[in-house]
Image (tube, grey):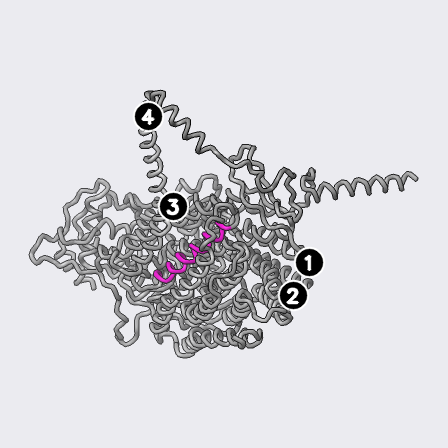
Amino acid sequence: MKTTNIFSESGIIITIILILIPVLIGIGILIMKLYSIMEKFLKKKELERFNAYVKDLDPEQVSKLEQRKKELEYGLSNYELSGNSPAVDSKGLINNINEAGSVRFIEEKRKSQPKHDVDPQLTTMILWYLGCATFWLVFGTTVGEYLGIKFVAPDADHISWLSFGRLRPVHTNAVFWGWASIAMIGLGYYVVARVSNVALHSIKTGYYSLILINASVVLGTLCLMAGINNSGGEYREYVWPVMALFGIAVIISLYNFIKTIAKKTTKEIYVSNWYIVSAMMFVLVIAIVAYWPTWQNGLGETIVQGYYMHQGVGMWFMLFSLGLMYYFLPQQLNRPIYSYSLGILAFWTQILFYTLIGTHHFIFSAIPWWLQTVAIVGSVGMVIPVVAGTTNFLMTFKGSWHKLSSSYTLPFYLIGIIFYFTGSLQGTAEAFRFTNLVWHFTDFTVAHSHLTMYGIICFMLWGFIYTLVPRLTGKEPPQITVGAHFWLALIGLLFYTFPLMYGSTLRGLMWIDGKPFIESVELMAPYWLWRAIGGSLMWLSHILFAYNFYRMIKRNDDIIIPTSAIDILRAKKELEQQELDNQGLTN
Amino acid sequence: MEFFDNHKKLFLSALGLFVLLTIFVAILPALNNQMDNAPLPNAEPMSADAHQGKLSYIANGCVACHTQQVRNVDMDKPWGSRPGIAADYAANTRIDFLRNTATLMGTERTGPDLTNIGTRQPSMAWNLLHLYQPRAVVKSSIMPAYPWLFEIKQTVGKDEVEVVVPDEFSKGINGKVVATKEAIQLVNYLQSLKQTPLPDGKLPMEFLYKKKEVPVVAGGSAVANLPDGGALYTQNCAACHQANGEGLKGAFPPIKGSPIVLGDDLDLFVTIIMKGYDARAEYAVMNAVGTDNNLTAEEVTAIINHERSSWGNDAKPVSLEEVKKIMESIK
């Protein structure tokens, strides 16, 4: 096969275009900046010429200019209509006044919406969910960071419990089931009840669910490190009794959600709940099919593995996060979703096509050729839900782009949406037979899974958490550390994925050329180093996220000097009350 | 639509669609595959030791970096002589009630594919040293070391296997590195990984996406048309004899300055490459590298000429015809 022809392959072209989209946007911004610098320079020159001209003005010209100035400056006194009475805001319309006097290094972003009425017990439960999720994020990515270092320093330790093969599934499962799943379900508890316009069916059972998931991840992690696993299918490394805990947790929450929806006071079931409830039903089907402990001999295991690992990603994480997105994005933009029907189209096509694509992880393997072809066709079909979803979200954004620069949450949403488009379509391109030759078995897959699981799911979840928690607790994170979290995560992700994709392409071409295997290992060394660097930035951003989360939930011990009329009066009342009490005591 | 305002109708239809598709793309094909396939009649059943080794392979998560599948594409040829078929995996059943079937096909080749490693690298000594410290045999390897599969002892027992570790990697060790039973079993498992030939001379599936054959110019000089000897050496020989041709003391003999390599007994040289060698007690047994890896006469000639002219070795190149003749005679 001629490798010079690589650029005529559709899969490669699609991927290059997808990679180019963010790069071209960046170049566009750069060109605009350069253009404005040039413009400034030219203006400066013109100013010099003008100054020379002004110096030589004769008195007659000056007096003419002064006359014109007087005319232009004519204005009304501003009291023509109102008279001289003082301004009053008797309806309390003016709010959120910022002083412009102080020095501002960081642009002040819009405050979160004020705390609103949520059952405090529900608030506490959701915060427990999000707190546990944050812990697993930090834990899981610390493990991931260490694994990345091991590519560069394989002799970093010689402890069996910390060896690469055992830790790798610890990382993936902790971030899957510990971080993303717990965060999603926690947010689900808010959204499901909210869009049904009723109170949650049962808060108490929500805690059972949380405890079971945590138990599952703790036990699973210990088992994996001790060398007890389910025989090596990716993301299926927990043995079934451990995974069963997770399954029971999902059943409990699902029951809770359905009971809540059954009591709904709205006529329609909002599309968020379509996605969320379906995701929970589907993940149960997936887990039962994959974990039923009496079948899957021979290649049956591989076919189920392909189905399991991709449905887990697409029918659980993706579907659930999209459901949350359909609630939080309109909320945050304060406008309805662009097209409700487009969301429903995306829902049904996602089920139809996504279910088919599992075996595209085993193209050219011994599994039936027809099944591989179905998977490739399904992967192409995924263009429909992805384009429908992206269009819907971006059109909802339309007309609100100005809000982006004044919000600290919306950038997370936007990056999530962009990666939803590029990451998902990259998956389609990777499923083609030719691209499988170049990229399959290389770190390209690792880069892809981080572009999607991290770029889409994590960014969306962060956006949702930064949106929701301040509304629950009334406390906002420091905007500067939220900004640092955003940029470190984004830049880290790009440093992580781009070198890996580039190096992997070279590696795949080397394999096609029949070069000795070990040369392809040596080739990857610098790209693995870049991956470790990018991974470190990502890891750092999670520490900042954990800090921000702490700031959002911390009990307020700060001394607050009241500034608003309401607060001043309340303070006065409290003080007087206190005095009365004191007198009561002394009497 | 009214229909979808009822939560039962809505969720049941979504669930129904998903389950229906699941049955067609996962459950039925999987059942069909597990019922319709049997291992090849000439496949060797796995020994008890090798099975224990497989459990260790699973426990240590080796599948994270090593695949066990030869795809029907040309680039996978180094990993096996024919593409894998369903029957190759048919002997795998559930490990036990707790643990699933382990076909160990894998999805990443951070390290090489191991489908046929028992044929490609059957040496017990090499595999043990490689497990103890991969970088002792393959300098740029990034595989983890597995020192916990070995013990440090003062004396080596009768049935125990000592691993000779190069000085660089045995600093601070007082005593001898002895392989535990688990290490031996793990190597037994690796040795058992061999592709079973198809019975009755059945032709295997073809490899797709073939490389363009370089046309051989008739009558041209033999040396010009030979494949890259350096790359072939790296692929087939360097794991033991090392990239610098110096071998490893007490394990693998040097090629640099070797009388066999530099001498005129081409017959012996070709025979060692094709059939293996076990004449010197101080070194490990060499397997039949040439036969095991299906090396052609062109490739053997290229390797020989590379070895005769590298690391200060300075002997005349040999011709393809000579090697061809010897290979015919020892078949």
* Crowdedness near tag 1: few (<14), some (14–19) or many (≥20) residues, C-alpha within 10 Å: few
SS of the residue at dot 4? helix
Which chain contains the residue that carries disc 3?
A: B
Q: Quarter holding the C terminus of chain B?
A: bottom left
Rendered view: B79 above or below B93: above
Magenta stretch bounds: A410-430
Q: Residue at x 36, y 39 (%)?
A: A33
Mark nearest the camera among 4 and 1 is 4
Q: CA distance from mark 4 to mark 1?
A: 66 Å
Name of the residue lying farthest toward the right: A587
Which chain contains the residue that carries disc 2?
A: A
Rendered view: A471 above or below B38: above
Residue corresponding to mark 4: A48
Residue corresponding to mark 3: B136
The residue type indicated by label 2 comes to Val
Residue corresponding to mark 2: A198
The residue type indicated by label 1 comes to Asp
The residue type indicated by label 3 comes to Ala
